[in-house]
Image: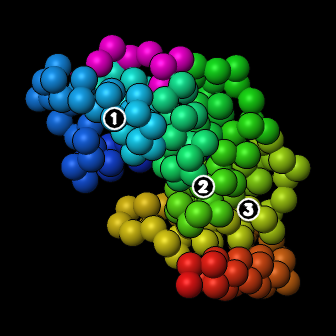
Amino acid sequence: MTRLPMSAALVVLVLLGTPWADAAAQTTEQVAALRQRAEQGEAFAQASLGIMYRAGEGIPQDYVEAVKWLRLAADQDHAFAQVALGFLYGTGEGVLENNVVAVTWYRLAADQGEAIAQHNLGVMYQNGEGVPQDYLEAHKWVNLAAARATGDDQKQYAESRNGLAKLMTSAQVAEAQRRAREWQAAFDARQK
């Protein structure tokens, strides 16, 4: 089974300077201010707090609290919170492991154009976890992820896509590429 790259995503977000970036240097007041914003319903603060609880950065690690805060943000369509919830359901951290629910959260974020969600959804289709195994759908989602990602993620997703293509006929690859183009066109139209 392929492990989905949540930890790598957390490292990337930390390096990009998100509110939880320098958790060791965060003061109690900063965490309290973040919690206050989260309690007031700010999705970004809820997602940040959820990630902090999941990673144990700046506050004690607590998967149940992570799920609580991430769900609040995810219910407000915060894409990365949806990815994080998908990961937690896929690994059973803070919740009962449930790949069907993981796929649901990944799909919501993937439909918003979140590359890591698209990749993870593709992996779920490739492995038949939470969905019937379907290489065409797997290729479509991983192809979309490779087109959106940058740096090492782009390379990893492209390698994943190319590995999938080796399991498929040329007609199947062409069909998966057609599906990816159609999805992208519909996504672009929604963004206007």
On the image, numbered disc 2 is attached to which residue? 109
Region of the chain picked out in magenta, as a range: 58-66
On the image, numbered disc 3 is attached to which residue? 138
Scheme of colours in the image: rainbow
Dot 2 surroundings within 10 Å: few (below 14), some, or many (20 or more)?
many
Residue 37, labelled with which disc? 1
Say what amino acid the circle numbered 1 marks.
Arg
Q: Residue at x 33, y 27 (%)?
A: 35
Foreground mark, 3 or 2, reads 2
Q: Position of residue 68 (x, y in %)?
A: 54, 25
Dot 1 surroundings within 10 Å: few (below 14), some, or many (20 or more)?
some
Say what amino acid the circle numbered 2 marks.
Ala
Which quadrant of the figure has residue 170? bottom right
Asked which secondary structure carries label 1, the reply is helix
Q: Position of residue 16 (x, y in %)?
A: 25, 53
Label whose residue precedes the other's in the sequence (3 or 1): 1
Foreground mark, 3 or 1, reads 1
Q: Quadrant of the C terminus?
A: bottom right
Dot 3 surroundings within 10 Å: few (below 14), some, or many (20 or more)?
many
